[in-house]
Amino acid sequence: MKDVDTTKMSADDWDELNFPRPEVQEFDRVVERAISRRGFMGGVLAFGSGAAVMGTSFLKGSTAMAQAGSRFPFEAIPIATDNTVHVPEGYSWKVLVRWGDALKPEAEGAWDPASGVSVDMSDKVFGENTDGMELYNIDGREILVVNSEYTNRRVNLPHAENGVPTGLDDVRILQHLQGVNILEIAEGENGWEIVVDSPYNRRIHHNTEMTFSGPAAGHDLLKTAADPTGMTSLGTMNNCGSGRTPWGTYLTCEENFNGYFGSTETAQDQKPLDVSVGFQRYGIGVDGWGYDYHKWDERWDTSKHPNEPHRAGYIVEIDPANPDATPVKHTALGRFKHENAAYAIANDGRFVVYMGDDERGEYMYKWVSAEPYVEGGDTSRLMVDGTLHVAVFNDDLSGEWVPLTPGTTGMSAAEIAVFTRMAGSAVNATTMDRPEWVAVNPTAPEAYCCLTNNSRRGLINEDGSIRTNAGGEPMIPNGPNPRELNNYGQIVRWRPEGGDHGATTFAWDLYVMAGNPTVHDDAYAGSSNINEGNMFNSPDGMVIDTTGLIWIQTDGNDGNEGDFAGMGNNQMLAGDPETGEIRRFLTGPRGCEVTGLTWSSDRRTMFVGIQHPGDDGGDWPDHGGALARSAVIAIKRDDGGLVG
Ligand code: FEO
Ligand code: CA
Ligand code: CA
Ligand code: CA
């Protein structure tokens, strides 16, 4: 496993490498199932007359939606396969901050493309691989909070063969370049720039001290030699999507945390049963994903500290207004591969958070606080006291949020918080096609979730059984996940009963099924709002702006050939929730993923993240053969108008 470059594999592929499941494709059978009526029944009826209607027209890739009345303030752009960013006529973009840029005056020039950054300066520069972000106006200052999801060992440790750490300093450099970045920005003559000497600038990384809240705080499952109380933690990791609260804090979401842990002994089965079963479900392996922390920093060695992985995989709350504030890991919101956290307020004022678990066949969740949110009131218990629910989708377009309680699951509250996936299994939650970002529509009582893809759904194993998720549940096509071998993805939408996000039942449909109508004429052509001019694959990031436009970012196959011919580089599109129309707004440089989106307080600038642009050897944004660098860009209208 040591010679595999983790940066070239998806997280799910890594997990399958660690925990192999048999894979034999009976191709004809699989295709037959995929195109059968039963295979894509989900969404046969849709909300409203103009929505993305499934059924027979669904097969044809009709462009009718594109001719409907338009609320888009821009003309769609074509795909790109080049090495830069494109936006529509009338808009311009500029780099705001890149991996390695200084966030403190003493770190100016500290990052060098050939030698990387020293361990002393590595927690004073902008981290690598930008992801979710939110902006806060604090005392008139614009404070951007941005995740750095993961790091590429080879380019950050150029002195180390294949980027394999050679000592604790190397591990520290990697740990510092991931986590969360807090930076003040300001718009001047040269556009938006970092305020390098701002007192708000802060790096939060894999070693930053935090505390636990909720039912698992202080429980035996969280106790370690370094923290016998089980109440404090070091670090937040694999910070993927973002969220915010109405009281001004930032939520960072720990996704593929499992990959950082390893074991200096191979006998995983020596652990207590609950620990080893949990390791299997969460993909905690012996080798990890090549970071090799466990060989130099004992905390990450599960043979010595088997509870350490129980202390990651949470929603973490950070106060950007107070640089000295200790982040809080909220165990009540569950432990899984958190993608993002999208809040809503129930009709009675309770605080609701929708969340997805991004792994093949895992679930969607909803948190509902016990007490209502009151502006200016005490918010400290709103992610502590309440109920976590998991989604069950029915094929008849109805659905239910099932509470995860000792009564429904047979598990204690602390066990539900730590082994949330098993709690979901206990109530027969619906296996999903990798839930990525959830977005709540601020203009209508509805929410959306990107189901990015699931190439293993419906696969037939050697023994004739169907491929399962990590919990052993067969990934049979179901309502919102209707296609086998789903390489394109879809976006599910739900409307809570009575228009109340506090309700436990909902109606759902599919807003879009991505596909390629130039290659396929069946379910893989996509839904009727997909056509040759707007097709894409693997929806991932998603935010709905104040006008109700849905911004969709992709993290998919950008090979532009075969099933993906005509889709080009990863991109950002905008969707109209009412007509279903989707238009391409931005194309990223070759090899990148587009992820993370927020706006300046005056809504005249849109900030977009460009992650891993160098994955196929590009040199964006510095060009001239320079090392490619993940970056956040600022996009404005040339006429200074609103952009969302
Ligand atoms: Fe970090 Fe599921 O994306
Ligand atoms: Ca993502
Ligand atoms: Ca993704
Ligand atoms: Ca990704």
Image (cartoon, grey):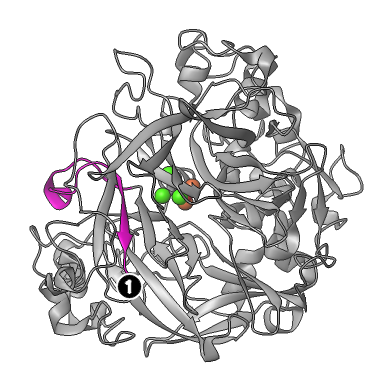
If the picture is divided into quarters, which one holds ligand 4? top left
The image quadrant of residue 488 is bottom left
Give the magenta range.
556-576
Residue at the right extreme, as displayed: 229
Tell me: 139 left or right of 400: right
Q: Is residue 70 within the magenta segment?
A: no
The image quadrant of residue 266 is top right
- In percent of width and height, residue 592 lies at 34, 36
* Secondary structure category for the residue under label 1: strand
Return the residue nearer the eye: 493 or 602.
602
Tag count: 1
- In percent of width and height, residue 519 lies at 8, 58
Tell me: 81 left or right of 381: left
Q: Amino acid at mark 1?
A: Tyr
- In percent of width and height, residue 549 lies at 38, 64
Can residue 450 be spotted in the picture? yes
Residue 399, above or below 133: below
